[in-house]
Structure formats: C-alpha cells, structure tokens
Amino acid sequence: MELKRYTGTFPDCKRQIEGAGQRIATARQGMLDRIKQGPNSHYKTEGCWYPEGTAKIDGTNYWCLGKFAPTTHYAQQTLEANAREKYLPLTDEIKLGEKPAVQLIREIAEQDAELPAHQKRILIPTRQDLFSVHSEDLGDVDIAQFLARDPRVAEKYGKFLRNKCGINNVWFYQIGYEFDNVGAGFWLHCLDLDDDSKFDGSVRGFYLDIGSLFGVVLN
C-alpha cells in the first residue's frame, strides 16, 4: 500500500481519488506514512486534509470518522460555505443516510460512550477548547487516540514529532464557542518546526486549490 497526493480544492481531490478507483487515506494512514517517509519528506512543508471531520452541536464539539463527517459527504456545500468564511450549517437537509447529521452524530456518540477513544466512531473529547500538549504525551490525548485508532500509534507519532522533527508541542484546534450546529473538516499541519503539526478541526479552507488529500493505492 502506498499513498498518492492529489492537489486542489477538497471536492476536486475527492473526485480525483474516486475517479482513480482509490479511497481517501485516513488520518491513521497519514500518521504512519509521515513516520515512514521521515521528517524531510514532502510532509515537511505540506499539510493535508483527511476524511475525518468535526461538528459543533448545541455547544459540544464532536470528532467524527470519515463515514460520519458531514463535510466529507457534503464537500461542495462545505466549499461554498468556506468561501464565504463560514462553516457548513448542519440544517435538517444535511443528512447521513436517512437521518439528519445532527441526530445521527448524537445517537452514535451515545452508543459509543463507554468505548475507549480509539474504538469510537464519534468522539466527544474530554477537552472542548483550544489546547496543546507535549509531543511525547500525544498518546494520552483522546483526539489523537481516536484519529490514530490505536493509542500506540498516537504515541509513536508523538515521539516521531519530538525526536525526529524537533516539535516539542502539538496544538489541537476545535470549533469555537461562538459557532453552533456547524461542521468543519480536519487538516493535519505539516512537519515544519514553526507549524507544530497542529491537529486542526476548525479550519475553513475547502475552497483553496492548494489543499490536498491522499488516495490509497493498493499494490
């Protein structure tokens, strides 16, 4: 398996990947590929989107796997909202399957409430604010565990950032308190020391044609 980068707006990249008969690489696959490619690869100066996303519903931030991330399924609508410097509004018309996204996200979060973070399909993070942690403690952060799908992978990525990239702290961005009932995409920043490889679940840039997604190429 290898990952191939596609560049353009989020919808453009998604269409290119689907047209090539590939699937979008997950955040877990991206973290492992960064470790494999090393600190001086293209990841040093180029961040990227992943299919996971976030939602802010009635004052609570949710992190969603790609299957349940509204912005991934409504990429063009998200682009149009982001181009106006807005988030995707989670109206009743934004559905996942036959249910409004707001309803389904709540239901799944409740169903998975007792599971460990790395097994959840939708995570309500312990911390709801903007925060940072020491890179070597990344494996203890529920958002990192959730995205990596394994605390050991999150820990390994944190040690890679610290020991190979010289990144001592990692920031986690979430949708701010002033917004509600909206969705955002997930952008993992590059490995440049000044960028801190942020986990950004609050970004509004689906319209930027310098964005990128990775497709999974099966050998």
Image (tube, rainbow, N blue to C red):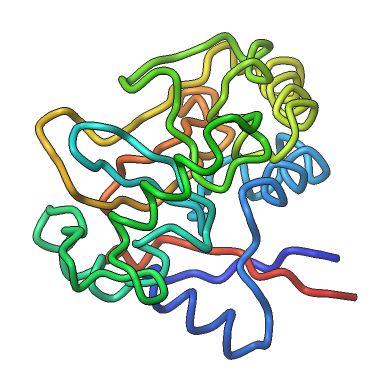
Q: Is residue 42 left or right of residue 205?
A: right
Question: Hey, which quadrant is residue 72 in on the image?
Answer: bottom left
Position of 174 relative to 53 (above/below): above
Question: Hey, which quadrant is residue 74 in on the image?
Answer: bottom left
How many numbered tags mark residues here?
A: 0
Position of 138 relative to 51 (above/below): above
Give the residue at the far bottom of this rendering: 19
Q: Is residue 31 left or right of residue 175?
A: right
Position of 49 relative to 59 (above/below): below
Which residue is at 28% across, 52% downward?
A: 183
Residue 57 position, x and y percent, is 23, 42
Front residue (pair 151, 20) = 151
Residue 47 position, x and y percent, is 51, 47
Position of 183 relative to 148 (above/below): below
Which residue is at 41% across, 49% downward?
A: 107
Question: Hey, which quadrant is residue 131 in on the image?
Answer: top left
In which quadrant is the C terminus drawn? bottom right
Which residue is at 68% across, 87% downward?
A: 21
Which residue is at 47% across, 49% downward?
A: 108
Q: Is residue 202 left or right of residue 160?
A: left
Q: Is residue 197 left or right of residue 116?
A: left
Front residue (pair 64, 189) = 64
In which quadrant is the N terminus drawn? bottom right
Residue 137 position, x and y percent, is 65, 11
